[in-house]
Image (cartoon, rainbow, N blue to C red):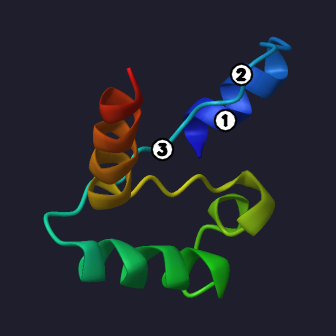
Amino acid sequence: METYKEWNKVKFPTPPVMITVANRTETAARIKFSFDRAKIKIEELCDPEKTLHIDSKVLDLAESKRKRKN
C-alpha cells in the first residue's frame, strides 16, 4: 500500500503489481475467490476486473495443442 501511495504521489504511469503463486490449482482458486469476494482486507486488490488468473494446467494444455498444429 505504501508503494501505491508513493507511485501516485509522483504520478508513476503503472501501478504496482502483486503476484500470488500457489502450488495447487485448488489453492489458487481459493485465493482468487478470496480476492473477488473482498475477503482480503486490502480493498485495492479486490477488483475482479483487475485480476488475472493463469492456471498452469490450462496453459500447458493450450501450449501442447498449439504444438500439435505446427
**Rendered residue at 51%/58% (across/down):** 53
Q: Position of residue 59 (x, y in %)?
A: 36, 47
Type of amino acid under label 3: Met
Which element carries disc 1, helix, strand or loop?
helix
- Please state if 38 lies on the left or on the right of 12 as rendered: left
Q: CA distance from mark 1 to mark 3?
A: 11 Å
Nearer the observer, 70 or 54: 70
Residue farthest front in this picture: 69
| One can see residue 40 in this view | no
Residue that numbered label 3 is attached to? 18
Q: Earlier in the sequence, mark 1 or mark 3?
A: 1
Type of amino acid under label 1: Tyr
Residue that numbered label 1 is attached to? 4
Crowd band around label 3 with a 10 angstrom C-alpha radius: few (<14), some (14–19), many (20+): few
Task: Using the image, determine if residue 47 lies above or below residue 27.
Answer: above
Type of amino acid under label 2: Trp
Q: Position of residue 3 (x, y in %)?
A: 58, 31
